[in-house]
Amino acid sequence: MNHERIEQKLSILADAAKYDVSCSSSGGSRKNTGGLGNSSKSGICHSYTEDGRCVSLLKILFTNHCIYDCAYCTSRRSNDTPRAAFTVEEVVDLTMQFYRRNYIEGLFLSSGIFKNPDYTMERLVRVAKTLRTEHRFHGYIHLKTIPGASDELMKEAGLYADRLSVNMEIPTKSGLALLAPEKNHDDMKAPMQTVQEQIVQFKDSRKVHKHAPKYTPAGQSTQFIIGATGETDHQIMRLSSHFYEKYDLKRVYYSGYVPMLSDKRLPDISTPVPLVRENRLYQADWLMRFYGFGAEEIVDAQNPFLDLQFDPKMAWAMRHREHFPVNIQTAPYEMVVRVPGIGVRTAKKIVSARRFTTLTLDHLKQMGAAVNRAKYFVALHVPNPHLNELMKDNFRDVLLSRTQSKFKDDRTGQLVLF
């Protein structure tokens, strides 16, 4: 092996992959049955470096050659950038070497599209198949699927990968037509549909045949690029809700557009990355998946953008003060969990503990609630003086004056949820 050439390829193709944020695992439960690696016990938890790289997976492109010319992509065919491509054997060898050195816990493999979708997808599948069958690799594998690839390749990919994903990229059809006229959303949804059908089919098979193989046990995900076109948060959240319901996705990822290329169809190269908006979308997504909120409750046609000054749950509570205060002693769980400052785990503790004691703000704090926010929205067995603020016309200003934002203009790192 020419190590110098491999190092050059790795530098180019790892750098090209860093803008794809949809590589966090997991949900995978692949067990080690005598080979190498383990995706269930290693607890693959990934963090991200400041420039978006995932540090515990080997995150690379198979190639950055591409037949498409998407305006937002550094690998687009008209971009003058160094090009490279791995062979199947090189990716397999790199994965095994990195794993044995404890550099990584798995592989995230995406690719530009050279020649045609089937030609590219076939090579991605061969990488996963070789790792599983020849090297008995039981670590985590996430493959990007290629829109337009045949159903047969999609079906085979899910037998070796823990997770499959296809990036929707631009959320609206008009935006995609503007920036990537050679693509369309229907082609991107097709592999999602195939994967979803296979997941259901294999689950049914396992009910009858105990040893039937698992199909992409960590499910599938997708990613939206945010801020490259004029899409609203309302459009994005509705689309995410649709994908969760129709394709049973495990995650939707939101990637703030990073201006890298000059193109009159794109935001100016000096436009800041919409990090706060990206974080608010993740918070809103969290509310849909774990708090029982519908997309239309979080943002609607009259308020199509998320409030950047408050998290989506606080913003919803301020718009719907008629639902508050919530009696913490008697309210159903579904309302307790909607109180700003009270998370899912704390809400469950509250519902359990109130059967045996009369709760106070101190109790809520001990159970993990952010009382500095929750105190304005809960009724207790004793008068709560903070409720006087709730009905004031300037309630929003009161909260702003008493809130210290964690967002700094000079921030560069990963933001946190809630």
Image (tube, rainbow, N blue to C red):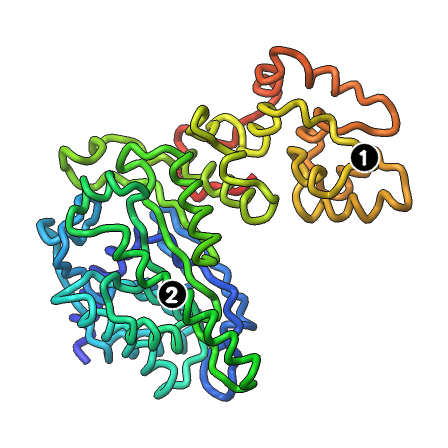
Asked if the residue at tag 2 contacts the one at tag 1, i.e. Cβ–Cβ closer than 8 Å, the answer is no
| Residue 120 occupies quadrant | bottom left
Instruction: Provide the secondary structure element on which disc 2 rests.
Output: strand
| Residue 103 occupies quadrant | bottom left
Nearer to the camera, 105 or 257: 257
Q: Is residue 408 visible?
A: no
Mark 2, other Cα within 10 Å: few <14 / some 14–19 / many ≥20:
many
Which numbered marker is on residue 67? none
Q: Position of residue 418 (x, y in %)?
A: 56, 39
- Looking at the picture, does residue 393 appear above or below residue 342? above
Q: Which residue is mark 2?
A: 164
Kind of residue indicated by mark 2:
Leu
Q: Is residue 154 visible?
A: yes
Which numbered marker is on residue 362? 1
Q: Residue at left 30%, top 78%?
A: 92
Q: Position of residue 136 (x, y in %)?
A: 41, 85
Horizontal side of 8 relative to 26 (left or right) equals left
Q: Position of residue 303 (x, y in %)?
A: 45, 25
Q: Position of residue 14 (x, y in %)?
A: 27, 60
- Looking at the picture, does residue 269 appear above or below residue 2? above
Q: Give the number of the mark in front: 1 or 2.
A: 2
Nearer to the camera, 403 or 331: 331
